[in-house]
Image (cartoon, grey):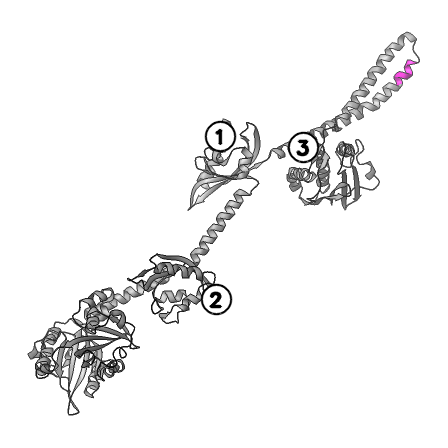
Amino acid sequence: MALFDTLGKYEAVFLEQMNDAFIAINSNWIITQVNTRASRLLNRTREELLHQCICDLNPDGFADDFCDQLRKVFVEQVNVQFRTFDRMLEIWFEVHAYPVETGIYMLFQEVENQKSLEPEEEFYYRSLFLQNPDAVYLMDLDGNFLEVNPSAEKMLGCTRTALLKSNFRLFCTPSEIDKTNRHFQLACAGIPQRYELNIVTRDGSMRVIDVSNVPISIDGRVVGVYGISKDITERKQIEGALRLSERGLAQSQRIAQVGHWELDLKTDALTCSKETLRIFGGEAMEEAIPSEVPFSMIHPDDRRTVKEAFEQAIKGEPLRLEHRIIRPDGMERVLLMQGHAVGDDRSHVFGIVQDITEQKRTEQLIMENQMRYRSLLAYNSDGVVALDLHGHYIEVNPAFERMTGYTKEELLQMSHKQLIPFDQTELEQVKVSWESMIQEGVPYSLEHPIKHKDGYFFEVNSHNIPIIINGNITGYFTICRDISERKRTEEILRKSDKLAAVGQLAAAVAHEIRNPLTSLKGFTKLLQDHFPQEKKQYFDIMLSELARIEMISGELLVLAKPQVKHYDQRNVNEILLSVVALLESQANMNNVEVELKLDLDLPFLQCEENQLKQVFVNIIKNGIEAMKQGGKLLISSERHGLEARLCFVDHGCGIPPDIIHKIGEPFYSTKEKGTGLGMMITNKIINHHKGRLEIESEPDKGTTIRVFLPIFHDE
């Protein structure tokens, strides 16, 4: 009967090929398995037999001792052989009952002529002894062999003659002598024994046998011991391999977090693997549980979906869905359930369940990273493109489309070189930086023009970053910022510096010319009165030329004066920001931090943008230069009634109160090398915008300059 333990997946085929009727019951006496022979012999269908109590199956049919014999098998864990009469069917059965881990296995044989068998009983017993495939032997109370069957000779490798002169202990391994003696003595005391034993046969080979010792009683006195031994060496090897395989399967399931399950829709019994129970957080639960136990753990929002999926599975559809559970410890997990219904009535659903919580979290992280990447592209005000190693566009963002005038579809058919008009010298310089990035992963930046789809060029600052995947550089990102406005502002600054230089020269020349010019004019007029009339024409020519020199010196001063420009609606905050960006490097070099506090709701002003830039350049440069030891320059904008008020606060050397009123006068400056033209021009521009300038200053503490410009300005 030990063969049943090794059947595994071939069990069903084996049982159907048996000539005997086979019935298996569990520890609750419930029939769990029958073969076709049993169904025919008992005149019941398989469905009528399964899930019934064996004792309730035919309470008026089986003999009274039937259940008593089965109880003995359960209690004593011994093999039992007996005959019973079914009153309903009027049939005698020969029953062999064997204890197994899950309950009892029974073999039923119909006895066609009970009466004719009784006189021949001795013959049958003898036949059973001699033809039994298991080793059967008779021993005295000392363990000496009194009789052995051919199977015993074959198993031990000795002849019957040799064995009848031997003791069973000769075949025991030294390590198991004590155990064997204990079992033998208990059998001699009238207690049947069953145990496994390692033996050494005559040829020296090791075998594993399943031993049953049954006391031989005559008139209530034990006179010997029957031994029945089955060679289970191969079975043990198979069991070992199965255990190893099961451990490997269990470990594999644990690693993959995959468990299997079976749902009996008729009994609502759910049989689960240990990994399935662990996934549901129920390691302590029984492996066979009611289906409502795991169903109650399904997330309330997913229960209807799960129920509908099982209903479709019963109709023959494959079962596959993801759902959430809430485990007893409160932890929420995400599971992937797969399975299918089997059987003609699809009453059983087999499947697997996998914990994919970490996988879903990883997918969520990947999706979030992709969304962040997409957001970086979609909402970035700078043009962002991805290129392969040949310089072809593989991704572009909307800002780059707007910047170049091309659509994404057009750009993906183009290369970066088509938009960048490098000459040969520039190409060689860029090639060095590009190769350094591709070979060593070193980013680089450069300024260059890009050709718009409409044909004009605009300046950009491009920052190039390698794309590294699995340690390999597969392409690169280019981030382009339109710096056309910055370039224009820089040009204004250069012009401002040039104007200051010209103004300085003009002021110097005019200053040097005007004093002697005044003297010349005065003495010429004085001399004119002392010469005859005919000579006065020479003095008129001299005075005319002196007036011309005076006019030229005046025109030199006009070079430093602002000219009338066209006025437009402009955002004064944006003008401020562009100037701050322009002077940021100068501020950094002087260790000056520029802090902005701008009113974003400030209305647009009617102004001339470049002139206001000139005003802000002059004021901010003065503030930076006033803080020789570094410091903070605060710039703010706000609405002040019908005016926009712009404040510039530095913490520099300050201006003495007795000369503060001179600021803005021509040629007056508090700086050692200043000309005074900067603040003069600033005043002129502000006045021309119908604004005003306020200056507050304290020596050694700093200066505050306020510029007021009208919000509603009628040009």
Q: Residue furthest front?
A: 88
Q: Nearer the viewer, residue 608 or 519?
A: 608
* Disc 1, SS: helix
Q: Nearer the viewer, mark 2 or mark 3?
A: 2
Judge whether residue 528 is colored magenta: yes
Q: Nearer the viewer, mark 1 or mark 3?
A: 1
* Residue 120 appears left or right of 368: left
Residue at which label 1 appears: 418
SS at badge 2? loop
Going from the N terminus, do you reach mark 1 or mark 3 first? 1
* Residue carrying label 2: 330
Image side of residue 161 versus residue 237, left or right: left
Rate crowding at label 2 as few (under 14), some (14 to 19) or many (20 or more) other CA atoms within 10 Å.
few
Asked whether, in this view, residue 433 is left or right of residue 19, the answer is: right
Instruction: Please state the horizontal and vertical placement of residue 364, each as a whole percent of the image.
Output: 47, 53
Q: Which residue is mark 3?
A: 493
The magenta region covers: 523-531
The amino acid type of the residue labelled 2 equals Gly
